[in-house]
Image (cartoon, rainbow, N blue to C red):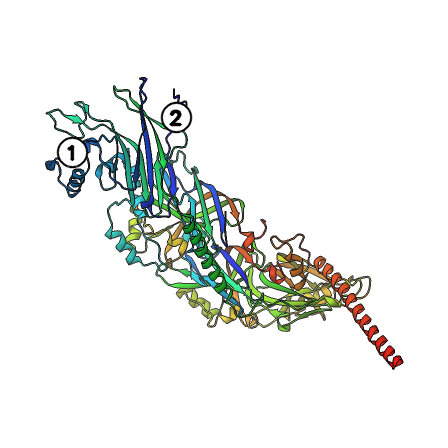
Amino acid sequence: MSEGGTFLLSITGQIEFAEVMASAGSAFHCKYEFCSGPDWKIIGGLEAGITQIANVVNNNDRVVFNYPIDVQFKSTNPYGWPQIVISMYRGMTLEGYGRTHLPIRPGNHNLIVDLAKPKASSLLGYLGSFFGYQPELLQPKMLATTAGNNLIRMENCGSINMNFNVVSQGFLRLGYDFGDSN
Amino acid sequence: MAEVHIIGQIIGAREFPKQEVFCKWHLQIGNNWRVIEGKKEGQTQVSSSQFTEACNWSYPIDIHLATAGIKGWPKIYVEVYHLDWLGRAHLFGYGLITIPTSPGRHILNCYTWRPTGNLRDRVVEYFLGGGQYIKYPDLIFSSEKRYKMSTEAMGVVIFELDLILRNFNNYGVEY
Amino acid sequence: MEYINEHPTKSSGIYRCPDNIRNFRVRVKIKENTNTNMKAKWVEKEFLWQEKHFSFSQKLFYKEKPNCFTELDLHYHNLVAEVDATTDDILFTYIDNEDSCHELEATETCNSLLNAMETVELRQSSADEVEDEYNFNKSLQKLLNSPFIRKNVAQMCIMLDLGFKPSVSFCILRQHENGIIRTKNERVLCTITYDIRTKVLRVSPDFTTTQPYRLDVEIEDGRSFYYFIEHASKLMPESMEANEKTLIKKINDYKSITAARILADPFRVPSKNKLLVFVFLEILSGKKFEYPHVYVQYFVDLPDRWFCAESDVLSGRTQICKAINNDGLLHFGHCVEIPLEYNFMSVHGTDCIKCPYIYFEILSKDSWDRYRTEGLTYKALPICTSGSFTYNLNCFRFTSKGPISEMRRYFLGDCQNYNDVTWIGLPTDYEKKILNKYGTETIATGELKVRLNVIHQSQAFIENLRGNGKHRPKPRIVFEKLESSTLIKSVEQVIKEFKNAKKHLLEIRESVLSSTGS
């Protein structure tokens, strides 16, 4: 039960599938974590996770994960609304990062998150990319906090589909209005 | 005192002449507005794509504002730049949008334009890059002096914003 | 006779423990299931977090000084010396700093990918909280300082000691007693893992409710045990909980008070009987006009009883934009804020509220400074409901049948060849009943895309919404609401005037009486 000036947010859903340029025989897995503001606290559920290894049989097939996401938050303030940061790997090399805010209005939402991977910033790295060198971010969370992502070159490479159900409690009582669904 | 939460993202850019663009955005508010939490401005990373025309940033925006009036409703002003292989930044456009006034989810297109010069300027720009910049950004937000400029159309920056309003009903505001 | 029907499956329970883990207690009750008629007794023991209990075999082991090599072993040697060595404890624990504890939980890694994945995960979780400013050097330093896999979890295993088993296979521990090699025979009852960073406790298998778990000891013996795992931590006393709640409430109240003080002035509310309509106009883009260098001029026409505080925003002009690509695409991105006021007390009888119009003139200027009208269009401002509206307005321009006007337009330019732009719509002071525009020739030109955001504000809405402040009532047709409040106001006014009149009458009567009386 929410008390005082707090409201609760419960999000269930799944990472459904990813559409990337998948060649037959490649194996993908995904990691996700949440990043939220200072007034937010996770009170239940899974905070982070790694999916299973999904193999691709035909070229350009969808990479299906169907990985469950289930988390409950408590907060006093919509500032710092939680974001989910997803890192997708092909084998052991990075395939891309994706970041999105969790949906705000209650109901069912289908989100398509674009993936991007960093490009090498030096000439040596550029030559290395022909041999499989793929730079990674030290902390994928910085995509969510935007601390220091000036002038990083990134390349878009696909998208991930996710489906969420959002239930909130105590929001309207505090006077917030988040509009009708359109 | 009423509060406005702007939570969303700059999805990306479309139809710019070259890829590898990044965007600087600023929030413009009136005198009776204050930013309680959140950044008023920011800069996205540089994005490009190998096989499609897409240029997606997915840059998060999260701002908490307090206000004592409707006048001066926030606007977002963007400057789009292109980062070439030598690391120079060329201006690719200016744009301005008003934050919507009704709560809920909005997908907004920000149409950008860039000032053009005369023929000589354009030839120089073709070879060396650069081009004309606006010295005082006031020209962009205020509407009175705009007619002096001659510009050309550039691409579109797409925003996806969710708006949460609080306590506006107590002051008789209908949105 | 106890007949236990179902055996619950052993699955892990995951709990969050924000409080100190040292207050955690677990109680295990175990009983051997024998087929004989002799009733076995329940053996019960409580364990604190990371509390070391020794089994019989361990006691024997650590008692011998030559067996102890490491510091931990010596420490245990001292502990065992204090404890009574003869009691037969079948329940004991392995705690975090012992290797055997981690060996029991080690998963078999079947391929190199799985191995590598575990490495990747743990390195991720050992990153500290993200600071505001990302510092590449600091982050790299952290990674270099802790290159090895360090699990951030503390573990504890509750074990069952089944005594010695004479056997020649698998020697884990050798106990030399009378030269017979004995092997350790113990089973894991319960594994408790606590992640210090996320404060998540994992109890595997989970706490039992009503039915005990069953443990079967394979290999020859065929013994089986039933055991309960119960959570036995003491709960926080009521007073502490109440204190915590009041403290949290105080902090929240303080926060909301400071937030409310951030602005000096209170929210500006219009005076009574006034309706404020804020229109945020954005001229977005245009396309398919004839000449390339185009700008837009707009003009808002206000009918009676509408006022505008800043009259200079009622008309304006965008920058000149050069059209690109085949469609002749133009981007303006021009934003204007227009605050309008409507005074609705002056509504008498059945007068309808007239709507303001906005007129757009699209003009082009070329390098010879010739100005041409590219298009004209108008729209009624959507003031009856608030919200966001995007319009694609189609434009036309005036022409005439002969070739002369087109040639004039080409050579000289034909800017604003009309007297009054409101002619294209409905002029606001048009009184006649029939509108006849026959005879004027026009041709269609391009399109203009415009977005309007409208917000209404009035004191009348406060009264309406105060009752059910939770949700916005629908439909949001502004003037319906206003009308109900004007009715009330007019009734109030009538009553007020009646009271004044009555008071006046009484005064006159008194003065008359006093004058006649005196």
- Asked if residue C5 is positioned above or below residue C493 in the image, the reply reads above
Between B23 and A36, the one nearer to me in the picture:
A36
Same subunit, labels 1 and 2: the answer reads yes
Instruction: Name which residue lies at 85% across and 75% down.
Output: C509
Across and down, in percent, residue C28 comes to: 32, 33
Toward which corner of the image does residue C189 lie, by quadrant?
top left
In screen coordinates, is C383 left or right of B106?
A: right
Q: Which mark is residue C7?
A: 2
Toward which corner of the image does residue B142 lie, by quadrant?
bottom right
Determine the chain carrying the residue at label 1: C
Whether label 1 touches label 2, CB < 8 Å: no
Residue type at mark 2: give it: His
Helix or strand or loop: what does disc 1 sit on? helix
Determine the chain carrying the residue at label 2: C
- Asked if residue B167 is positioned above or below residue C19 in the image, the reply reads below
Residue type at mark 1: give it: Phe
In screen coordinates, is B141 left or right of A30?
A: right
Disc nearer the start of the sequence (1/2): 2
Q: Which mark is residue A177?
A: none
Between C85 and B125, the one nearer to me in the picture:
C85
Across and down, in percent, residue C16 comes to: 39, 44
Helix or strand or loop: what does disc 2 sit on? loop
Tell me the mark number nearer the camera, choosing from 1 and 2. Answer: 1
Disc 1 designates what residue? C61
Between C160 and C440, the one nearer to me in the picture:
C160
Instruction: Name which residue lies at 24% across and 52% down.
Output: C144
- Which quarter shows the N terminus of chain B? bottom right
Instruction: Tell me the crowding category of disc 1: few under 14, some 14 to 19, or many 20 or more residues within 10 angstroms, Cα based.
Output: many
